[in-house]
Amino acid sequence: MQPRIYGPFKFTPITERKGFRWPNGSRIALWVIPNIEFFHLDDPLPTGNNERVAAAQAKIPNVRNWSLRDYGNRVGVWRFMEVMSRYGVRGTAAVNGDICIHHPQIMEAALKLKWEFMGHCQTNAVRLNEMEPAQEKEAIHQTLETIAKTTGRKPLGWLGAGLAETWSTLDFLIEEGCLYVADWTSDDLPFRMDVGGKTIYSIPYSLQCNDTPQFFEQKQSAEEFERILKRQFDWLYRESDESSRVMAIALHPFVSGAPYRIGAIDAALEYICKHDGVWLATGEEIIREYIASGATI
């Protein structure tokens, strides 16, 4: 993509997108995205507030903050699997490629639950906009190939670590056959992106219904995060009288997988799934149905 003033898509207000419906007239597509991430012990790590530390200032090993994130993979993610399965929710896991190498048990369990996988960089310690173009292209390729070898299927979706992109990211994703990308949090419905005459779709990800910003940046409690998820759903459900919506919930095992927070996820999912017209979908299912609907935006 060439540098430009506005995004690689048409500006279309949500008010011009009335009448769209998911399968069977569903009002809300519930999309739950566990971010399953790997940090090397010998890499610079975020602080306890999830703020990034410059390599020159980092103290390595950072046992305190590395262990916090390792807890998510050793303990927290298994709570996600138990709670989500209770309500029939299949995750679309945003997976660092290194998870496949170092924590294969997580991948095996997620496969049994029929979760979808999307690429999320090789490790969460390095972001695409910190790389030279050739390195970025190879990092995307290696991430998708590693997941494909583990799962038997190349991911069709992508979420950058830190939602970071360069002017070349979308081109590289299209070359790899990706169908959708979650970095552009611009809408409550998918939309088509035109990248040099080629197409990739944006899917509604969330920085609001996302445990890391809410707990680390907004300093919300577990009870407040539960209310946030319910309020988000209530308003989208109200709007879905005119047109269906996507509700994305982004979760991190080391955050909401803690014992005193997991109950908020349990209660929110129970509340949402009790409503009529809630479609429990994966990212690929959402985009496939959006394309099949004939939507041109």
Image (spheres, rainbow, N blue to C red):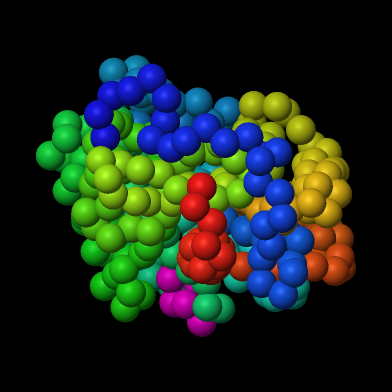
**Closer to the camera in the image, 293 or 138:** 293
Q: Which residue occupies the foreground of this view, 272 or 70?
A: 272
User: Residue sitting at 56 percent across and 46 percent down?
Assistant: 205
Residue 183 drawn above or below residue 110: above
**Any magenta on residue 171?**
no
Residue 268 is situated, as x and y percent measured from the top left of the image, at: 81, 56
Q: Which of the 4 image quarters holds residue 215?
A: top right
Residue 62 visible in the displayed image: no
Residue 117 placement, left or right of 223:
left
- Specify the quadrant of the image occupied by residue 117: bottom left
- Tally the marks: 0
Going by the picture, which residue comes out furthest to the left? Answer: 134
Where residue 249 appears, as percent x and y from the top left, is: 65, 51
- Residue at the (28%, 60%) spot, across then down: 177
Left or right? Give the position of 144 relative to 290: left
Q: Position of residue 128 (x, y in %)?
A: 30, 36
The spot of residue 187 in percent (x, y) is 60, 40
Q: Name which residue lies at 37% across and 51% down.
A: 200
Residue at 70% over, 38% down? 15
Q: Magenta span covers which residues?
A: 107-112
Q: Depth check: 217 or 250 in front? A: 250
Image height of 184 relative to 253, above or below? above
Q: Nearer the viewer, residue 234 or 59?
A: 234
Quadrant containing the N terminus in the rendered view? top left
Q: Is residue 79 above or below residue 268?
A: below
Q: Main secondary structure of the magenta part?
A: helix
Query: Is any part of residue 90 visible from this angle?
Result: yes
